[in-house]
């Protein structure tokens, strides 16, 4: 039987919440179409899938899952988190062809350009895998206070971070905003690109098989504004990355986020192909400073 | 308990400070009247004596001050860092030279004991300028990339509890990084900021680099909302902090907030009780408890509760409340009638909700704003006095049985600024410190500050850090 005669098996794209793959509790889906220049001219591209259209209840469930996962993930050793992030890169490498196809469809790219995007995304996981056990030394350290005290500042994860993934860069952009959040021990509720959610939903399948504990990353598809509003107002969300919000929505969400003083990363122009700086990690880190008296050996202490 | 010792009064001399009958706003290097001619009186909280009449900034004055700061920004930010450093070193030295004068002034205007202004506030103020002076020509090495840039005009609003120290925390890093400043001191404590303006003059600081706008909340709101302000820094209440966060939403203004707290001071059964008692007293009665990082919730392990409370009550009975200028005074005046009313209302609520109130025998002066050191026992986590920041000399005592319970209770708050741990067991200190969601953890000590040590909160205690290398980030375009 030749390929042309065989009817392919479609994938049901599902959300990724608490390590499981639920549909939206609302039962809603929306149509996701391929993006090509011809398709845009015609008004509509080829049908790709029906993606779950998440509700505010899905958002709240995702926050519960993320909060539940925070203790374990933030308490894991930095070395362990690094290995888990590296494992994500390994799993992605094995699924490279699938993601090249999905990214090409999602972003209207040629196969070679889509391949460059996927390669960069895989490399980005590797880059952040290496950061997990280095960031504390780079931004923390001993403080030479003027007194007999041992005084140490260390970065700690902020907590549950809502991440509005970039709308255009549906995969490299997504990885570039999610990896820095979880590298340092935060857990994330991610809202995928509204028009191009499929690479994000497939990333959930990769994370599920990469030793990332359930709930560390939760991925929702749907209308960004609808899902983002309850996340920005949620009292158990500690921070929000507004990368995927336009100017008007970003302002609304920042105002809502002020209600429990979420840390807010405003949208900014980013070239996701460039090697990042540490700012997407530091945006979601707290600094804890611990003091302790050093005591003194007094006259009997050795001077050597 | 009868007082064991009687002390003769030992007042610090007021003659070291010369307070003028009136002060203007400090804009573009000049003292000027408010555009609408408004003035307000600042009083000594310990006597209600009017100290001076101060120009009250309004929206038009904010406009003038921001314009002056903008005009000064170009040259100031273009100076070599080593030159900016020298201005800051000059300021640090002049503060040291004038520190007794400033300490007396601060005690008069704020009501806190001279012991504190002389031995804590002023040394820290000078140290803060000295510390950030040294950063001005080393920013390339601060870990924010090569040649980090200043943001522009910084709008800074500070509280009344540490007037000059909060000014130093705001102005020193802002100037070191090349920003210019418009600062609004609190309406009850404008004087030390105006004396600081004179120090800027003595130091030869270029005009417009520092502008001081005494005034009320409306001036602060206008400053924060001003479209030509690039950076907003606020220290004060969480409610106002949230309002400011809403105001700057959708702009490019960089924001740092240092807000309220409800710090837990955790005492384990193996803690040295006498040292812990001293730490508890420092934690909640330093500056009459008007400290955002105060250890206002005492969490004591059940098995040592009685012993600790007996010891604590005995110690509180020896605290001396009275004339803040007296060198023997431990507890000064509450900063304002408004703050006193708030403390009074919250403590009445504490009683009404069923907590047990105790204060040592303590005679309060007949004029001024005073509140006796107060202890509440039988406090539950649901009580208002265990949840809301009182910002006064009021300690709520709760108990726990296990370290896990202590951590859970300590973290059960919207705030996350400070915490204390008292135990002789090192591993327990590290384990508990690791679990506490607070920006500053003091183990076997409390309320220690240093310019090299980053300070700031988790959760609704705000964001951003002041002090240390970390403190530079708030004023750099990074």
Image (spheres, coloured by chain):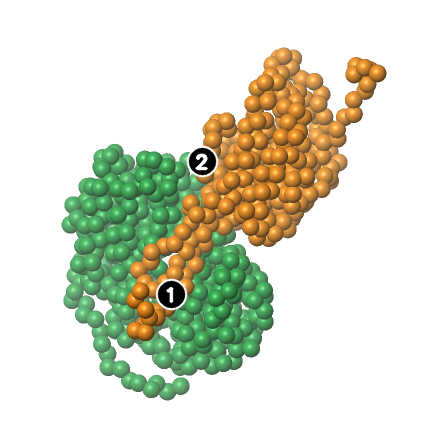
Chain colours: A orange, B green
Identify residue for label 2. Answer: A277
Identify residue for label 1. Answer: A294
Q: Position of residue B198 (x, y in %)?
A: 18, 51
- On the picture, is B297 further left or further right than B81? right
Q: Are marks 2 and 1 on the same chain?
A: yes
Q: Position of residue A212 (x, y in %)?
A: 63, 43
Q: Mark 1 falls within which chain? A: A
How many residues crowd around disc 1 within 10 Å: few (fewer than 14), some, or many (20 or more)?
few
Badge 2 vs badge 1, beta-carbon distance below 8 Å: no
Q: Position of residue A123 (x, y in %)?
A: 54, 31
**Sequence-first disc among 2 and 1:** 2
- On the picture, is B97 further left or further right than B339? left
Please, what secondary structure does the residue beneath circle 1 have? loop
Question: Which of the image's four quarters has the C terminus of chain A?
Answer: bottom left
In the image, B146 versus B306, the foreground residue is B146
Q: How many marks?
A: 2
The label nearer to you, 2 versus 1, is 1
Q: Using the rendered view, name the quadrant where residue B405 is placed.
A: bottom right
């Amino acid at each position: 039987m030749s390929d042309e005669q065989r009817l392919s098996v479609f994938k049901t794209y599902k959300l990724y919440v608490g390590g499981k793959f639920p549909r939206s509790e609302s039962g809603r889906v929306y149509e996701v179409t391929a993006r090509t220049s011809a398709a845009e001219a015609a008004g509509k591209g080829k049908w790709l899938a029906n993606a779950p259209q998440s509700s505010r209840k899905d958002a709240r469930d995702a926050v519960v899952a993320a909060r539940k996962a925070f203790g374990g993930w933030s308490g894991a050793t930095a070395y362990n988190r690094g290995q888990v992030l590296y494992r994500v890169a390994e799993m992605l490498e094995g699924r490279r062809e699938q993601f090249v196809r999905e990214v090409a469809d999602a972003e209207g790219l040629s196969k070679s350009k889509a391949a460059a995007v996927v390669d960069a995304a895989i490399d980005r996981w590797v880059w952040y895998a290496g950061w997990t056990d280095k960031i504390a030394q780079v931004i923390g350290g001993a403080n030479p206070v003027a007194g007999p005290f041992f005084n140490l500042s260390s970065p700690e994860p902020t907590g549950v971070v809502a991440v509005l993934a970039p709308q255009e860069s549906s995969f490299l952009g997504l990885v570039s905003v999610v990896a820095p959040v979880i590298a340092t021990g935060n857990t994330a509720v991610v809202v995928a690109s509204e028009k191009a959610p499929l690479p994000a939903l497939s990333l959930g399948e990769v994370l599920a098989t990469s030793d990332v504990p359930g709930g560390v990353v939760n991925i929702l598809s749907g209308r960004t504004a609808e899902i983002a509003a309850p996340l920005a107002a949620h009292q158990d969300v500690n921070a929000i990355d507004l990368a995927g919000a336009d100017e008007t929505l970003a302002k609304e969400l920042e105002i809502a986020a002020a209600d429990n003083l979420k840390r807010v990363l405003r949208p900014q122009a980013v070239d996701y192909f460039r090697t990042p700086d540490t700012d997407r990690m530091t945006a979601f880190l707290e600094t804890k400073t611990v003091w302790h008296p050093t005591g003194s050996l007094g006259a009997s202490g050795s001077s050597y | 308990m009868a007082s064991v010792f009687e002390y003769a009064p030992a007042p610090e001399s007021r003659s070291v400070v010369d307070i003028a009958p009136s002060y203007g706003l400090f804009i573009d290097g000049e003292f000027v009247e408010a555009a609408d001619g408004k003035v307000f009186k600042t009083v000594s909280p310990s006597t209600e004596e009017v100290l001076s009449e101060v120009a009250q900034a309004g929206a038009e004055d904010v406009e003038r001050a921001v314009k002056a700061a903008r005009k000064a920004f170009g040259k100031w930010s273009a100076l070599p860092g080593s030159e900016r450093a020298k201005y800051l070193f000059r300021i640090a030295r002049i503060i040291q030279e004038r520190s007794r004068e400033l300490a007396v002034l601060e005690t008069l205007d704020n009501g806190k004991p001279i012991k504190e202004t002389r031995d804590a506030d002023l040394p820290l103020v000078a140290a803060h300028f000295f510390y950030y002076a040294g950063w001005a020509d080393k920013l390339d090495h601060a870990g924010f990339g090569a040649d980090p840039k200043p943001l522009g005009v910084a709008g800074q609003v500070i509280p009344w509890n540490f007037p000059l120290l909060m000014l130093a925390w705001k102005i020193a890093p802002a100037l070191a990084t090349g920003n210019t400043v418009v600062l609004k001191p609190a309406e009850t404590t404008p004087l030390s900021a105006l004396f600081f303006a004179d120090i800027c003059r003595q130091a030869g600081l270029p005009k417009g680099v520092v502008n001081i706008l005494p005034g009320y909340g409306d001036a602060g709101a206008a400053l924060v909302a001003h479209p030509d302000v690039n950076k907003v820094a606020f220290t004060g209440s969480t409610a106002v902090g949230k309002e400011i966060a809403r105001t700057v939403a959708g702009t490019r203004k960089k924001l740092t907030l240092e807000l309220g707290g409800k710090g837990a001071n955790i005492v384990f059964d193996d803690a040295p009780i006498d040292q812990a008692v001293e730490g508890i007293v420092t934690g909640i009665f330093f500056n009459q408890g008007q400290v955002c990082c105060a250890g206002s919730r005492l969490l004591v392990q059940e098995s040592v509760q009685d012993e600790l409370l007996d010891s604590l009550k005995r110690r509180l009975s020896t605290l001396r409340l009275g004339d803040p200028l007296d060198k023997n005074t431990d507890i000064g005046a509450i900063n304002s009638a408004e703050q006193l009313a708030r403390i009074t209302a919250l403590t009445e609520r504490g009683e009404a909700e069923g907590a047990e109130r105790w204060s040592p025998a303590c005679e309060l002066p007949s004029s001024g704003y005073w509140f006796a050191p107060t202890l509440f026992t039988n406090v539950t986590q649901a009580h208002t006095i265990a949840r809301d920041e009182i910002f006064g000399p009021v300690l709520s005592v709760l108990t726990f049985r296990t370290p896990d319970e202590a951590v859970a209770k300590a973290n059960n708050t919207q705030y996350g600024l400070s915490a204390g741990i008292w135990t002789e067991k090192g591993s327990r200190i590290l384990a508990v410190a690791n679990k506490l969601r607070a920006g500053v953890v003091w183990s076997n000590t409390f309320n220690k500050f240093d310019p090299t040590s980053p300070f700031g909160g988790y959760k609704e205690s705000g964001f951003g850090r002041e002090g240390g290398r970390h403190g530079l980030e708030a004023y750099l375009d990074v």
